[in-house]
Image: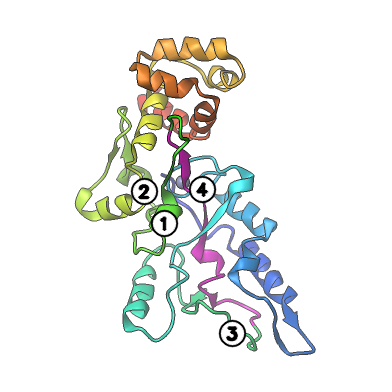
Amino acid sequence: MQFINKYQNRKKGHRIIKSFIKEHWDDDCQKYVNLDYDELKRCKKFQHLLLNEQQGYCCYCMRKIPPTDVTLEHVIPRNLGGDDEKKKKEFKYYMQFGYLKPRRIYYSPQIPASLKLHTPPYPHSIAYENLVASCNGRIYDGGSKCQLHACCNNFRGNEKIIPLFFLPRISQIVQYEKDGALTYDEEKYGASIDLLNLRHPTLFFIRKIWASIVTKDINMSQVKSALEDEKIRQNIIDDLDIPRADENKLKLDMYWKLFLEFHWFYYYFTNKSGK
Ligand SMILES: [Zn+2]
């Protein structure tokens, strides 16, 4: 996982949110019209900003997010709101992470219609500091039925988690092993990892294959060209020395494409092995 720094782009982030808010102000009615998160998630400029600050990778699973499949993830769930003390308490809990500070963000899932919002703090449903980019959480599971499983924000829903990407030491806190497993302090982070489904067998498998690619000194351009070139792919698969069932998965174009989207692990295992 990688640390997401919401400080360096904050001015750009606020500028985009401000102009988005301004666009929805109706001077005749003196209120906002259609100013809500559903409108914001269609804002390409905002999506690009979040993707760039994450180098294009999902905040949870490190998949390269296809530009057409960007999902905006609310760190503090959008459904928190109202007078419920429990919900207010949960909002406060998130204030210890990243730049989720009262001067930048406040508790409000609905955006007040008549209040003119010129400067931060902004409601948590549209605040820049509360939004990160995530994959759509769907992964091809192999087999003839093309099953899809859920991970990342698709799996989390509105559950309370530790936003791991806001921990500056996250690259040491969560590590990946050659067999595809994750290592971390189970007591502290286990519940969050489970709520994101990052221990799903498909993710295990993909990480394991990347580790093996690095061990066997297969380079990135070979792996990329194997998407189009079946012969290269077969050579790579033979080199990997894996069970037949796993070989069959990798022979599928759809699976190889998915595998390539996790190329972050190539660089991860290359660094880890000191190559
Ligand atoms: Zn993901």
Left or right of 181 in this view: 91: right
What residue occupies the far left of the structure in this picture?
187
Q: Which residue is mark 2?
A: 170
Q: Residue at x 46, y 34 (%)?
A: 145
Residue 39 is drawn in which quadrant?
bottom right
Please say if 100 is above or below 253.
below
Residue 47 x, y percent position in the rendering: 62, 55
Amino acid carrying mark 3 in the image? Pro
Q: Label 3, label 1: how many angstroms apart (C-alpha)?
A: 28 Å
User: How far apart in space, not on screen, are marks 1 and 2 (Cα)?
Assistant: 8 Å
Counting residues from the start of the chain, the first of labels 3 and 1 encountered is: 3
Q: What is the quadrant of residue 67 in the picture? A: top right
Q: Is residue 118 magenta?
A: yes
| 167 lies left or right of 235 | left
Quadrant the C terminus occupies: top left
Q: Amino acid at mark 1?
A: Phe
Q: Is residue 260 left or right of residue 169?
A: right
**Distance (Cα) linking label 4 and label 2:** 19 Å
Residue count near mark 4 (Cα–Cα under 10 Å), binned few <14, some 14–19, many ≥20: many
